[in-house]
Amino acid sequence: MTLVFSQLFTGISIGAVLLLIALGLSLTFGQMNVINMAHGEFIMAGAYTVYVVQQIITNAGVSLLVALPVAFLVAGAMGVVLEFLLIRRLYTRPLDTLLVTWGVALILQQLARDIFGAPNVQTRAPDLLTGSITIFSSGDGNDLMVANSRLFILTLALLAVAALTLGLRMTPLGRRIRAVVQNRDLAAASGIATGRVDRMTFFIGSGLAGIAGVALTLVGPIGPTMGTNIIIDAFLVVVVGGIGQLKGTVIVAFALGMMQSLVEYSTTISVAKVLVFLTIVAFLQWRPQGLFTLRTRSLA
Amino acid sequence: MFRVRGRRIAACAAVVATAMTLASCGSRVDQSSSSTAATGAVDASGTTIKVGLLNSLSGTMAISEVTVKNALMLAVDEINAAGGVLGKKIEPVSEDGASDWPTFAEKAQKLISQDRVAAVFGCWTSASRKAVKPVFEKNKALLFYPVQYEGLEQSPYIYYTGATTNQQIVPALDYLKAQGKTSLYLVGSDYVFPRTANKIIKAYADANGMKVLGEDYAPLGSTEFSTITNKVKAAGAGAVFNTLNGDSNVAFFKEYKSAGLTADKMPVLSVSIAEEEVKSIGTQYLADQLTAWNYYQTTPGAANEKFVKAYKAKYGEDKPTSDPMEAAYVSVYLWKAMVEKAGAFDVEKVKAAGAAGDITFDAPEGKVTVDGPTQHVHKTARIGKIGSDGLINEVWNSGEPIKPDPYLKDYAWAKSLA
Amino acid sequence: MTTATGRSAGTGADEKPEHSADRTRRFGPGTPLRAAAGFALAAIVLFAVAPLVLGDFRLNLLAKYLCLAIVAVGIGLAWGRGGMLALGQGVFFGLGGYAMAMHLKLADAGPGNLPDFMQLYGQIDKLPWWWEPFANPVFALAATVLLPVFVAFLLGSLVFRRRVRGAYFAILSQALAAALAIYLIGEQGTTGGTNGLTDIQGFFGFRLDDPLNQRAVYFIIAACLLLMLALVRQLMHSRYGELLVAVRDAEERVRFLGYDPANVKLVAYMVAAGMAGLAGALFVPAVGIISPALIGVVPSIEFVIGVALGGRATLIGPVLGAIAVAWAKTTLSEQFPAAWTYLQGLLFVIFLAFLPNGLASVAGLVRRRRPAPADRKAAQPKSVPLTAETGGAGQ
């Protein structure tokens, strides 16, 4: 019984990680239709930010909190530079964007290798986040425990979703972003500087990658190749979720996390991964536009 | 237009047919190959002698293999400073395997047939070794392989200076058994070494009254270990035998600690975590866990003090030394000893010198001897505990060098394996 | 995106004036005479010059490059002409390679014996059923091409009919490549796992360690490359070729004309898959190994860069590009491994962001009869479809 619950929570926590890494993409890919393969490297930049901040601030807890906004700014700035230098020219060529940003990803990886060295770097997590809390005690030493780091990531992911949803609904910038997504020409005609809105959207999307990077330092390695390992998963979440909608991303992230955890429990990671991929291919047969589709009256 | 097209295709076909008839006159499978020996001959004519260093300098394996290359270069420099081999300075030719197995095969061929090196040092993963093995056998050239591996191999053209299974895994199991552990959980990356190692562990457990409660593999590079950790925890084994490689270790140990599992509740014995990896995972997560190797930076002895000092002087004070690096360093000296005994660089003569089993070297890990028949090295097994300073401290050793036995022929319980 | 749509409809025919008719007919690019001369030149270089100039080792490297070039020819057709960015060619390359390697391993082992790695790691005493047919050389040879084509047919007929395209198609291909690689690694006992299938001794009765036979393998590969080029040229200059470009540029319009774009794309995709399979099969005797490392996400993307470099919509561009990239990789990574990664990244950035038509557009080597794809590719991934799709998806 304990196992069922801990497996369920594992599913939620895998989903939370997926959600965090896919959230930024659901903005840049989902809203702007830009396939940014360097998104994984922005996540990497966020993770290295924790490492750099810890060189200055030695207290693990404080440095983690400081790293969150710094990583958002660092990754966001990288995103803006990328948008300004390259992606801006490629809005009409999404497939080329994919390959160009793949090239950028290669360069960023090698840069990380040259700056921080090829081996993974080590960051300290605050003691609070390396422990776990016991939900209930079964008496036979097999208690249902929930890792604090996972709770932290889940909270962070949900906060980010809430902030993003509110931001898109309530703020003037959010309104402009939605307007541009739904009908770029009309938005431009209404006096919205679509170029600036694109850049801001990209800033926020990339910044969220930085936040995800900070969170990942709690559960995974921090190294030059960390981005490549997660980018495909992140894209699949957004593709299956459907573009232009945050709720699709959220639902699919948790669904895939749950599926991965349950299948993996009874088989192996490899089988689970292959099954998840094949399910996605099948799912896209059924709904090629993803779980939710943004219906607009525009022709494109 | 159609006619022109037809003519062109006909011309094409004709060219192809001629070329193929002209070309396909090489030797058949049942004949012995005639014209191969010439390409692989060692070039010993110059005032220097070339050796090949074949390591991944880029790609995922670069993390580990660059340290091996550093150790090889250190040995080459030391030997050159002391006058070289048979009066010739060693000229290292470094090639990048790029963490890609076909590339390893290609570069091995290049070192042998273009540079005509006397020997090649390197490779890390079993996959890269399997990829280059036919190249060395076909060209009758020498490879020195410096990493602990899964055994079940004995190529006449490869010298294995890392541990085989009976020098690392079997002693580690003996140690766990002596500690009173009666059940194990096996966690490994999904490739040859962990799968073979676990096969051996299961056979050992069967014969020694230990129980294997579970066995899980994660794809290389996998960083999501919450489910495996849940399974490990639920199984409640006496110890975890960890054959994970690379990045996966970081994620696994972070998860392991989060789940409230500790070294005294359920120790993890790892066979792929050396000093370099400890540094990147963090002692916060690793303290007091166990490792099995043949060498640690802390291994006592004058030879090791000299090695560690020289390495740090050359590559930086913060750079640790580890088992594969030491085995690589040793391999160059063993080759030198064999060449000097043979009095020539010729591959067959060098092999003949090694076959007698009297090639020894005072290595940082202690005295090592080349085993004639298996072309492996006699090595002392050591179990270590990871300290909070990031170094590994020996808690047990086998007392004397263990004779290599890649096919585990001398172990009754291993009869079913090979 | 909306702006692009509006434009796409108009840009079609009037982008570049047609070449003057009679010049084009006799000697312009794409004319039979010019093509015949080109093929003759290529044949002389591949069959006479290269074997004379290059030593055994370099010739063997060239053989490997030519295999990659065969993949590139296929990608050129699917991507440059058909607008389908095939980012999962590793799957087909792998299928072809494994089909060939399985046969060669079985032939090495001899009838009734298990391949060496199965005895070591598999702990099985009987050949798995799906290995059995590969003992037959005819079946294995046919499978190297037909297996990838069949898989492409299955995948393509599902995917294109549901109008999954552009980015979705690319990401889907990647997921498949990743899944196949993970599967092959997981089934170590019967597939060789990460090691792949190595240590292949013979090739249909000939010893692979004999330099003479290696030469023969090179000639076979070179001949296959020429044949594939001829095949793709025929396709490009046929009515089908015109249709394919039309689908790339304005899929909806083709549909309104009464063609089914799904079928048009499917054919190009299957041809590309077959070529990748053939290349994989030829790669095995040339290099002596096939492994999951050649199948996953990264190699699948790397196949594409040479095509982009050479000029994706041209016939010979992808070939030259693929050879150039492979050669640069060998040469540069020997000296400066880090520099190679930077350069590879830069190649992607430069040739896709700024020179989408590749070197062909720079040197003016090949004057295309058609306007370049990049100007109008824009229309392809999005364009009119979405309205049609939103309607179609709910059915």
Image (cartoon, coloured by chain):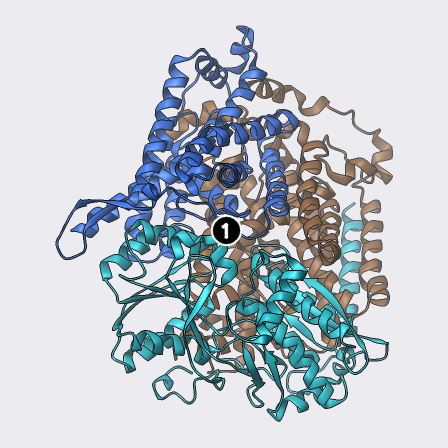
Chain colours: A blue, B cyan, C brown
Between C161 and B1, which is closer to the camera in this rendering? C161
Quarter of image, res B200: bottom left
In the rendered view, tell whether residue A180 sits above or below residue B295: above
Residue closest to the far bottom: B356
- Position in image of residue B269 (x %, y %): 37, 66
Amino acid bearing label 1: Ala
Say which residue appears at 52% left-offset and 11% top-offset.
A187
Which sits in the foreground, B227 or C219?
B227
Taking the view exactly as shown, the residue that stands out farthest to the top is A190
Q: Which of the two residues, C195 or C67, is positioned nearer the viewer here? A: C195
Reading the image, the residue beneath label 1 is C177
Task: State the residue in front, C92 or B296.
Answer: B296
Residue B44: percent from left, percent from top: 82, 80
Q: Is residue B307 above or below residue C24?
A: below
Q: Position of residue A82 (x, y in %)?
A: 61, 30
Which of the chains bears the disc numbered 1? Answer: C
